[in-house]
Image (cartoon, rainbow, N blue to C red):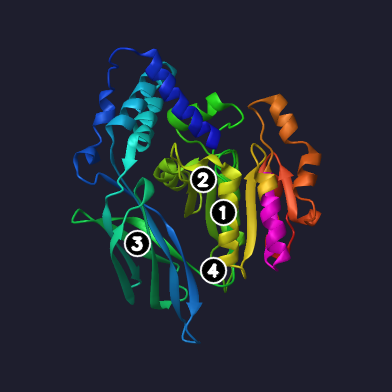
Amino acid sequence: MRSVTATLVLAALLASLANAGPVPVPTELDKRAWFSNPIEDVTLHNAVGRAIPQGTSGLCTVDGNVVARISHYDAITAGAFRLLAAGISLAIKTQEQRNHFNYVSPFFYADGNENAVVNFQVSGNGVSTQRIAGVKAANHGITTSPFRLTNVPCNAGSLPLSVSPGNSKTFEGASVQVVGERGFSVISDVDDTIRITEVLNKGKAVENTLINPFRPTLNFVEFYQRLSRSLTTQNGGAPVFHYVSGSPHMLHRPLQEFIKRVGYPTGQFFLNVFGIVDFDFWKGTQAHKLRVIPDLVKRFNKRSWVLIGDSGEQDPETYGIAAREALANGVDIKCIYIRMVSGTDAAKEAEQNKPERFAKAFEGIPKEKWVVFYDPKDVFNADIPNGKCQ
């Protein structure tokens, strides 16, 4: 998805060169009420908290990190994307597409408010509450802070999370998922895994991000719902879903709302922080995932893991590297699933889906632990808890 974001930026620049005179501004893009406030918008991330038992009391200490992005109107960025809006308006054919574009595009031309100061609050199910005051935003308006609660029921499930920027209103709607020492965790890619993006065709990828409403990949909603049920254990509770993607961080809220709308399990998104001069972003999606995934696995190294991705980019190679390291350290990697992409570019797909590619990517990993498929129906009845991946 890194190259798709670069395509968005390039398209904006080309549009500006192609339009020497003033470009009419679509009035819909100016109707976002949050552009009128000093701190205009807050995207509060779902978080994960590690539960550490306090003896045999049934109570736990829960620790983790909370994250929010504070953004505000930026005239320069807005101008570039308004030019882009004028350039791609010919591709918008339906009111549904226009509504989607008018919803998604402001997240790209709203800039991070790096001067923001916020207050987080994590509520421990009425037992204990922690308020973290005066957290300053960093690059791109992203604010993060550690938290630690005591005397939380170990089976709490999730804890309400809120944030208040300065003296403005409180933003809610996110939670901290309480994760025990044991149980199942799922690492999932986003583009062409749970969402139709068509990354192998950059033009279609931009269209499926900015113009077409987000659509789930065939049968993946049912696949994930089945996983949510089959991986729920008596001691570990429901599985935890971590959505790790190279998509730019501006898509965080649209993606959160997408998984809620279509029925994917709630989870945490780990997206790539995008900026023209952010060198970590330009290292690529694989580098981003290899920063995030090993950290998650190390933090919850007694849990059992399922990794799910697709063949469109580097998921097989990325998961192969992460899984070999985890297995060498005694972590239980149960299954790795790769969706073979199809329907976008037959020649590229034939190359991406070669059996020898997968054999090389998963070299050293037991064959019974990794499965490739076109349709997840092939593994609907897999008995993952007992190590049967198909």
For mark 4, what is the residue?
237
Residue found at x 59% / y 71%: 182
Q: Earlier in the sequence, mark 3 or mark 4?
A: 3
Query: In the rendered structure, are the residues bearing label 1 and label 3 in contact, judged by CB atoms less than 8 Å apart?
Result: no
Say which element carries label 1.
Answer: helix
Question: Residue 327: within the magenta?
Answer: yes
- Amino acid carrying label 1: it is Arg
- Amino acid carrying label 3: it is Leu
For mark 2, what is the residue?
280
Say which element carries label 2.
Answer: helix
Q: Earlier in the sequence, mark 3 or mark 2?
A: 3
Instruction: Nearest to the eye among marks 1 and 2: give it.
Output: 2
Q: CA distance from mark 3 to mark 4?
A: 20 Å
- Percent coordinates x, y for residue 338 in the rendering: 68, 45
- Amino acid carrying label 4: it is Gly
Q: In this rendering, would 366 be left or right of 219?
A: right
Please give the range of residues in magenta: 319-338
Rendered image quadrant of residue 353: top right
Say which element carries label 4.
Answer: loop
- Percent coordinates x, y for residue 297 in the rendering: 60, 62
